[in-house]
Image: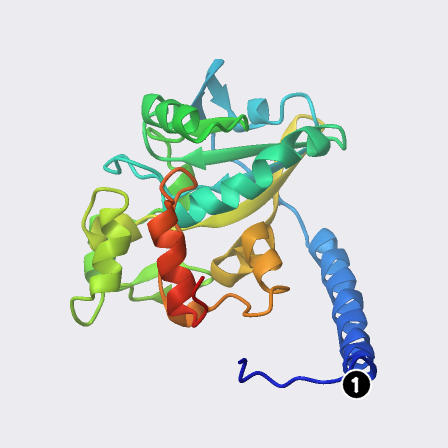
Amino acid sequence: MTDHKTATREEWLAARLELLEAEKALTRRSDELARRRQELPWVRIEKEYRFETDEGTASLADLFGGRSQLLVYHFMFGPEYTAGCPSCSAIADGFDGSVVHLANHDVTLFAVSRAPLAKLQAYKRRMGWSFPWASSFDSDFNYDFDVSHTEEQWQSGAVEYNFREVDFRPTEESPVLAEWASTVGTDFATYRREGPGVSAFALEDGVVYHTYSAYERGVDGLWSMQQWLDRAPLGRNEEAGFWWRRHDEYDSQSTHRHATEAGHDE
């Protein structure tokens, strides 16, 4: 027997209509924020960045692929990693199929990581993805857009991320942090010197402009799994901890375990 509040269909409909008004207000607010993103001033990119891609060495302008807009997902995959971040991997599962739709709307979507191209290609094959992925291994790109940090920055406790200065060093050893790091084959400090994010660029008259970037919860909207869970009866169930895995790492035992932890056995 559930301990959740129950109701008649009529009572549910009344509560649902009340919630609908709040959802409509949120949608209108989201539309307003989208317009404000597009109204942000553009910043000309002066530095020459170089990337390694499946087609060879490329400039930032080359990544546009003949289109006028470029979206970059800053995928956490450092040179020392043995696999991509599982959270970034879940996000990539969601946007992989969007690439063709964006391309037909004058937008190129690229993932960019610091790991060497061969590592990215091997992991991409493992995951079965088709989106373009570039290596910024020998470039300042990740550092300039605050999604990679040097060991010196980490040790100083003054990392620039999400438009503020933060200290990512844990105050004590955490099994959860150790588990996160183990999923990519590193220690936590090495793992967290990379960060997720998204950046947008425009190409006009041969000049590349930076138009937008977002980090941390600013990337939530791109994580389609979370959007689905927000509409499920138990939501994200975040108290269950780090439950998600790469899509080829789930098994029936783990699925059963997570259902049990949520209070719902088979």
Viewer-proximal residue among 234 and 183? 234
Name the image quarter holding residue 208.
Answer: top right
Residue 131 drawn at (x, y percent): 55, 28
Can you say which quadrant of the picture contains the C terminus?
bottom left
- Measuring 29% from the left and 63% from the top, which residue is drawn there? 168
- Measuring 43% from the left and 69% from the top, which residue is drawn there? 262
Residue 139 drawn at (x, y percent): 37, 32
The answer to whether residue 44 is visible is no
- Measuring 19% from the left and 72% from the top, which residue is drawn there? 171
Q: Vertical placement of 157 versus 52: above or below? A: below
Dot 1 corresponds to which residue? 11
The outermost residue toward the left is 173
Residue 245 drawn at (x, y percent): 38, 48
Q: Vertical placement of 209 versus 263: above or below? A: above
Of helix, strand and loop, which one carries label 1?
Answer: helix
Residue 35 as seen in the image, left or right of residue 113: right
Residue 99 drawn at (x, y percent): 64, 32
- What is the three-letter code of the residue carrying label 1? Glu
Which colouring convention does the figure follow? rainbow
